Image (cartoon, grey):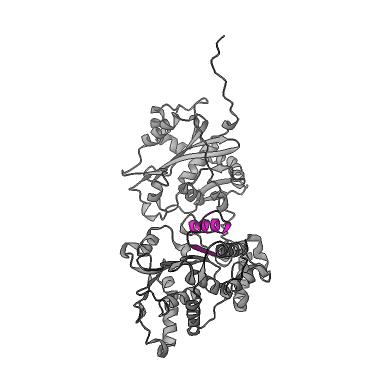
Amino acid sequence: MKCKKKLIPEIQNYIDIVRSGKYEMCKEQFQLCDFVEKCFEEENLFVDEVVLKKYLSLIKYFPFELYEWEIFLFTLHNCTYARIGILRFPDIFVMVGRGSGKNGYLSFEDFCLISDYNVVRNYNISICANSEDQAKTSFEEIYEVLEANKEKLRSHFKWTKELIKNLTTGSELKFRTSNAKTKDGGKEGKVDFDEFHMYENYKTINVFITGLGKKKNPRTTIITTQGDVRDAPLDHKLITALDILKGAEDDNGLLCFICRLDDEKEVDNPKMWDKANPSLRFNEELRIEIQKEYINYKKDSVNNSAFMTKRMNLPKGDKDVEVTDWENILATNQEIPDLTGCACVAGIDFAKINDFVSCGLLFLFKDKYYWLSHTWVCSRGADLGRIKAPLHEWENYKGNQLLTFIDDVEIPPSLVAEWLAEQRQKYNITTLGMDDYRYSLLKRALKEVGFDTDKNESNNIKLVRPSNQMFISPVINSLFLNHNIVWADNPLMRWATNNVMMITSKAGNITYGKIEGKSRKTDPFMAFVSAMCASENLIDSGDYVPLNLDCFTY
């Protein structure tokens, strides 16, 4: 829906640029324009143009000018209201390619909001990042602005290399780093997150935002490029942002500005680079630098993968080693039907019984493979401190217990056997897949709950060997590509799958291994692989037609 009336120039100018076709724009930019126009068309929004002009006048103190996209964002984020005193877009998510000037935007925005033009007193701002150097980037830029304009600004501010304070309003600007144990939420009016892709969980983020809401017009600003940490806050925020832009989710006050390639093949066309960097057309020196990086990337895409991730905002994993694309892993989040009574194959995997143990059930239903699983984690495991994944959040994730912590020196084999015995009351477990090492440790416990563990041709244990992985890996790859693997909304499975690497032999055969042995566990996925290796005779339960056993009287 296009707005029937012209919006103020600070908003309309950028929309016109996007729609002009003069520059390459990614699909999310067109969606954003549609979204903004729809909001102004359907809602009674207004822009405080008086304050906006005052804010924009402060650019004279900075060593750069604002681009149209920055003015567009600034206007919507800081001066657009749903009703008097209520910001329409108090939160903003900006993901642009490296070199776009996102820190410059943040510096200007924060300077405005601690200036005299923001009438909210004590409007404190914290710039947060995982490292001190990153947290200080915009802070130091504002510090340099104040140093360069001492004569004009010393009557308005006082500043040190740790704190900038407005003398009239009392508003303060400071930077904060990721040690959540020593940082309490303050009484901020605004919290910034710089390079959001570096956060591996929400622990630190939650600490930083606990002070919001105590000041009028609370805001958050997220600026970032893409990164290498998967199924973490950035991925979650990006999924939400894309759903908002597509109209699949209410925005809840979040304005989403995403610039990236639409397809990785576009990287070979320099004209398409503008899609990831909205400032590139103004910076020829930057274009030359990106061209040099592109040449290196084409020579060695593995060791220069940051080019796609940081410059083009399109993560490109090592295609020679990753199990599948992240998009295919995300596609496992589909609804699981009622499989009560259906035939299934069980799979078990663990490296050490004092670390992680995973077990699951594999079903074939109407050509899709469904996976129900559980993992036990030894709380005294030596590697537990290295793991960055939010395991405790997954212990009870959206009402589903994905894992259980065991406070003991090891995980008793009886727990796995008892879990399988419990599942067998609901499902028809026909076969159990595991390798020799796991078999020897669990044999007794499995036998006690009724599994035939004698090594003979008729037992229901399938001992999995590397040759079985070689046979099944092309099948697993095809299932991922066609989105026929389903384990619902299971972040533990997504995390474990993303931790797996494919190992290719000289003959071209593939087995599975760990990308990193200590902090990136693979057991939940390898249990799935064991079940797949044992699924040769698994029937499609979707084809099952129950017999009509109704009683007839003659």
Query: Could you say where residue 28 lies in the image, as x and y percent from the top left?
Result: 59, 62
**Count of numbered circles in the view:** 0
Q: Is residue 180 above or below residue 321?
A: below
Query: Could you say where residue 532 lies in the image, as x and y percent from the top left?
Result: 54, 38
Instruction: Pick whichever, 536 or 186, lies toward us.
Output: 186
Write the residue at 51% across / 39% down. Answer: 371
Residue 193 visible to an observer of this rendering:
no
Instruction: Decide if residue 204 is on the left or right side of residue 28.
Output: left
Q: Is residue 449 above or below residue 112?
A: above
Q: Magenta region: which residues?
A: 235-261
Residue 234 visible to an observer of this rendering:
yes
Instruction: Pick whichever, 251 or 62, lies toward us.
Output: 251
Write the residue at 40% across / 88% down. Answer: 150
Q: Residue furthest bottom?
A: 151
Instruction: Pick whichever, 191 or 551, lies toward us.
Output: 551
Q: Quadrant of the N terminus?
A: bottom right
Q: Is residue 255 magenta?
A: yes
Q: Is residue 506 magenta?
A: no
Write the residue at 61% across / 69% down. Answer: 5
Instruction: Pick whichever, 77 or 92, lies toward us.
Output: 77
